[in-house]
Image (spheres, grey):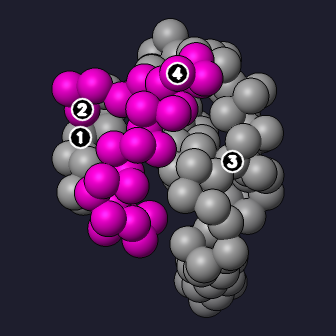
């Protein structure tokens, strides 16, 4: 039973890694950011850490750029664009989801690779 649990976690980690590779290599920056925000919010929601369409995401723009493989000016422009579309806002270490369905669409997000309980984030 323990062996099965370890093997399952290994497969889940591999699925998450494959999604990260796809996200950071084959998608435009705005899509990468939207996908990253979807994943972080979805995971926070599944863990019970998201409230009223928001979760903590204490990353600087520099750290966010390192996460999605983009330079600081590009991150700044992409964040501004996402704010202007009205889907998300990231301020003071807090991610606010304004339109979950549109964010999912922009980020081409399908949470099945996370292998979490079915969660319907309310945002």
**Is residue 42 shown above or below 65?**
above
Q: Earlier in the sequence, mark 2 or mark 1?
A: 1
Q: Earlier in the sequence, mark 3 or mark 2?
A: 2
Seen from the viewer's position, the closer of residues 77 and 91 is 77
Would residue 117 be counted in the magenta stretch? Answer: no
What element does badge 1 sit on? Answer: loop
Q: Earlier in the sequence, mark 3 or mark 1?
A: 1
Question: Is residue 120 something that shows in the picture?
Answer: no
Q: Earlier in the sequence, mark 2 or mark 4?
A: 4
x%, y% of residue 60? 20, 47
x%, y% of residue 71? 32, 65
Instruction: Using the numbered discs, state the Cα–Cα distance from disc 3 to disc 2 in whole angstroms.
Output: 20 Å
x%, y% of residue 103? 67, 33
The residue segment tinted magenta is 64-93
Instruction: Using the numbered discs, state the Cα–Cα distance from disc 4 to disc 1 in whole angstroms.
Output: 21 Å
Seen from the viewer's position, the closer of residues 27 and 5 is 27
- Which residue is the site of mark 1? 58
- Which residue is the site of mark 3? 107
- Which residue is the site of mark 2? 93
Would residue 89 be counted in the magenta stretch? Answer: yes
**Is residue 27 shown above or below 122?**
below
Verify CB contact (< 8 Å) between mark 2 and mark 1: yes
Mark 4 crowdedness (10 Å alpha carbons): few <14, some 14-19, many ≥20: few
- Which residue is the site of mark 4? 84
Question: Is residue 38 something that shows in the picture?
Answer: yes
Residue 22: quadrant of the picture = bottom right
Residue plotted at (60% across, 78% down)? 25
On screen, residue 13 versus residue 91, left or right, reads right
Which part of the image, by quadrant, shows the C terminus? top right
Mark 2 crowdedness (10 Å alpha carbons): few <14, some 14-19, many ≥20: few
């Amino acid at each position: 039973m323990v062996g099965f649990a370890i093997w399952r976690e290994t497969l889940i980690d591999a699925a998450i890694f494959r999604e990260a590779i796809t996200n950071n290599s084959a998608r435009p920056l705005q899509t990468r950011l939207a996908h990253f925000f979807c994943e972080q919010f979805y995971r926070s929601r599944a863990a019970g850490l998201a409230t009223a369409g928001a979760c903590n995401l204490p990353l600087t723009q520099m750290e966010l750029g390192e996460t999605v493989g983009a330079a600081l000016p590009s991150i700044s422009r992409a964040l501004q664009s996402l704010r202007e579309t009205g889907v998300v806002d990231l301020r003071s270490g807090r991610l606010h989801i304004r339109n979950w369905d549109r964010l999912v669409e922009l980020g081409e997000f399908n949470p099945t690779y996370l292998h979490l309980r079915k969660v319907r984030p309310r945002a």
